Image (spheres, rainbow, N blue to C red):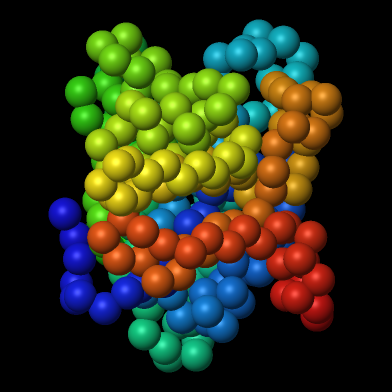
Amino acid sequence: MISKSSQPKVHLVLPDSHAHADYSNERYNYIGKLILDLKPDVLVNIGDTADMASLSAYDKGKASFHGRNYEKDIVAHLDAQERMFSPIVKAKKKRPYSVILEGNHEHRIKRVLDFEPHLEGIKYGISFKDLEFDRYYSDVVEYSGGNPGEITIDGCTYAHYFVSGISGRPLQSVHHAQALTMKRFNSSTCGHSHLFDYHVAKDSSGATKQALVVGMYQDYISPWAGRSTCNLWTSGVCIKRNVEGGRYDLQHISMEALRREYGKT
């Protein structure tokens, strides 16, 4: 468990952002400027920040797969990270404690190497280290036992997604956040579904649990999902203020609001 002091904190949570070689990374500029303005104590990247489309299996062998390239995926991802962190570096300001959670899209690299271990290599092959998470983040939370890893910060537990029982499948529901308060023992936050949901539960002792499903952070139509599915998703970032003991005041800022504020040249 990580908690640097007893003072309430500000957490900035970046949902699934899917940096993709075929689409602009301009939206990451907005995050970099927001970090500089907000000065959060904690930055949580919930995972799937790298789309890794070249390692996708959903349309492999089809015409839509043509032109995908592992190197392009890595370049797009690294460009996104540079856009996020360069404003605070250039301003010579203190960086927040930052954590990245490995999502299922980054996990594609490890899955490929499970089946094709001869492809591994830092210089001439593929490697999870190509993502250079250690370069940008204070802590990296990788998969554990085949499931997304978890980290607890100031009483809030984060994971790319939480699993349902022994099946290892993502815990999901029509009322996803409410299900998290019923299944989890503390305040929990996850991504993965691209949906936004929030629920607060209290018991007879007055103890409070807050559950948050953070949505996503992309401004393009995912080819695998199509427009009708993407219309169900909520794009933006989440700010938790006064974080202490798992309790917090929540603010969601939409992609549109960030573009209006930070999309100026």
- Give the residue at x 52% y 79%: 38
Count of marks, rendered view: 0
Q: Examine the rendered structure and indicate whether residue 183 appears above or below residue 164.
A: below
Q: Quadrant of residue 221?
A: top right
Pick the residue in front: 196 or 205.
205
Residue 195 point in image, percent of width and height: 62, 36
Residue 242 point in image, percent of width and height: 40, 71
Quadrant of the frame with the C terminus: bottom right
Q: Examine the rendered structure and indicate whether residue 91 appears above or below residue 40.
A: below
Quadrant of the frame with the N terminus: bottom left
Pick the residue in front: 251 or 72.
251
In this picture, residue 226 sits left or right of residue 132: right
Pick the residue in front: 58 or 63.
58
In this picture, residue 48 sits left or right of residue 201: right
Q: Outermost residue, bottom direction?
A: 92
- Give the residue at x 61% y 41%: 196
In this picture, residue 257 sits left or right of residue 95: right
- Give the residue at x 72% y 10%: 62
Q: Outermost residue, front direction?
A: 204
